Image (spheres, rainbow, N blue to C red):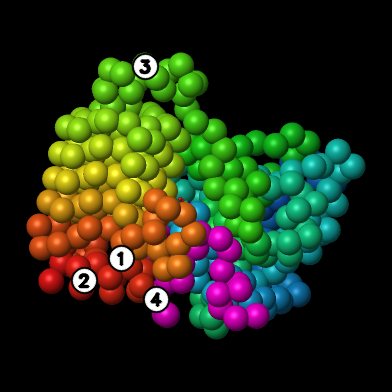
Amino acid sequence: MTDRERLPPGQQLAAPGKWPLVGERLPAADDGPWTVSIAGLVAEPRTWSLGELRSLRWIEAVADIHCVTRWSKLGVRFGGVLLADLLSATGPRADARFVSFVAHSAREHSTSLPLADAIELRTMIALDADGEQLSTEHGGPARVVVPGRYFYKSLKWLRRIDVLAEDRLGYWEAEAGYHNAADPWREQRFLVASLTRQEMREVLAARSFAGRDLRSLDAAGHELAGLDARGALLRNADFSRATLADADFTGANLSNAHFAAANLRGASFHNADVEGADFAGADLRGADFRGASLVGATFWVPNSSTADSAFPARIDRSTQFDERSLDDLLPEQAQFVRCAVE
Ligand SMILES: Nc1nc2c(c(=O)[nH]1)N[C@H]1C(S)=C(S)[C@@H](COP(=O)(O)O)O[C@H]1N2
Ligand SMILES: [Mo]
């Protein structure tokens, strides 16, 4: 298969050799030698040290990473052990249906999968990537790797695997509305809006966005010039074709938001999270992206099939970026933006 064929819909390749960091940057404080345990609905709960894990049947598997914020990194060779091998050492009970992975991290980050899917997808506990020990920022000394699911199912700093009868939603699935099934080939990115249709109409009429949880808001085509949306949670919000001149999105979370063909002249995205957001066809003259987090953001779509993204964003010298955020852009996007701001 060519690289293109290996890219699920709406994904772009990260620059060769680059592996963006997403979510938590560090595990919780060191509390002694690292262990991984299996608990819950098993005949015999068990705990392994890192040395014991390395002495089990060792698996090398090449996996493609697909982040929900629209970047992919193909062909990472992970080394580790199969979840199935650990599970069979503990003997899951007949009523076991789900596994929940729990991290040794500040918020006890977790994510879950149906047990049958986890096994069928050849989920592994990875200790190595591309022949070296996993770095701490990427989940070392032990992370989950679930091939064939968005990467938020691949938990960093694995400490415990709970075997459960009922599902227990993970951190992103519960807090950010990420889709619990997470199949990149079906673009199962987001599930739920935080508001009802009626609540959305009220918020749009009142134009009071600042600091609110408005994820998956549908504001397509709305007239919202001068909007105050500072610090708002607007993941996956739809602002396609909206009028947002001079809108203030300072510090907002706009990850995977849609701004195709929107009027954003003079809008501020200062310190905002716009990872995976789509700005194709938007008017960005005078907009401010300084301090914004831009991994996976789109400013033009090669061979676009939708009218809203048929044209590249309007970017010129008056559009402000800083070097660090430009550096985060995926290669095709960086090239376009760097040319446009000259
Ligand atoms: N413990 C923990 N694991 C996590 C996360 C997190 O915030 N905490 N984020 C998830 C998400 S959303 C992604 S895309 C990947 C990112 O892994 P990376 O930073 O190695 O690229 O880790 C996943 N596992
Ligand atoms: Mo992610």
Q: According to the image, label 4 marks what residue?
A: 15
Q: Is residue 256 above or below residue 6?
A: above
Q: Dot 3: within a 10 Å radius of its alpha carbon, few (fewer than 14), some, or many (20 or more) residues? A: few
Q: Is residue 227 found left or right of 3 in the rendered image?
A: left
| Chief secondary structure of the magenta portion | loop
Distance between the Cα atoms at labels 3 and 4?
Answer: 42 Å
- Circle nearer the viewer, 1 or 3: 3
Q: Amino acid at mark 3?
A: Glu
User: Looking at the figure, which quarter contains the C terminus?
Assistant: bottom left
Are circles 2 and 4 on residues that touch, CB within 8 Å? no
Going 45% across and 35% down the picture, which residue do you hit?
216
Q: Is residue 109 found left or right of 271 in the rendered image?
A: right
Disc 2 is placed on an element classified as: helix
Q: Position of residue 228 (x, y in %)?
A: 20, 30
Q: Is residue 22 found left or right of 34 in the rendered image?
A: left
Q: Amino acid at mark 2?
A: Arg
Going 24% across and 62% down the picture, which residue do you hit?
325
Q: Earlier in the sequence, mark 2 or mark 3?
A: 3
Q: Position of residue 213 (x, y in %)?
A: 38, 29
Q: According to the image, label 3 marks what residue?
A: 202
Which residues are the magenta region? Answer: 1-22
Q: Amino acid at mark 4?
A: Ala
User: Looking at the figure, which quarter contains the N terminus?
Assistant: bottom right
Q: Quadrant of residue 21?
A: bottom left
Q: According to the image, label 2 marks what residue?
A: 338
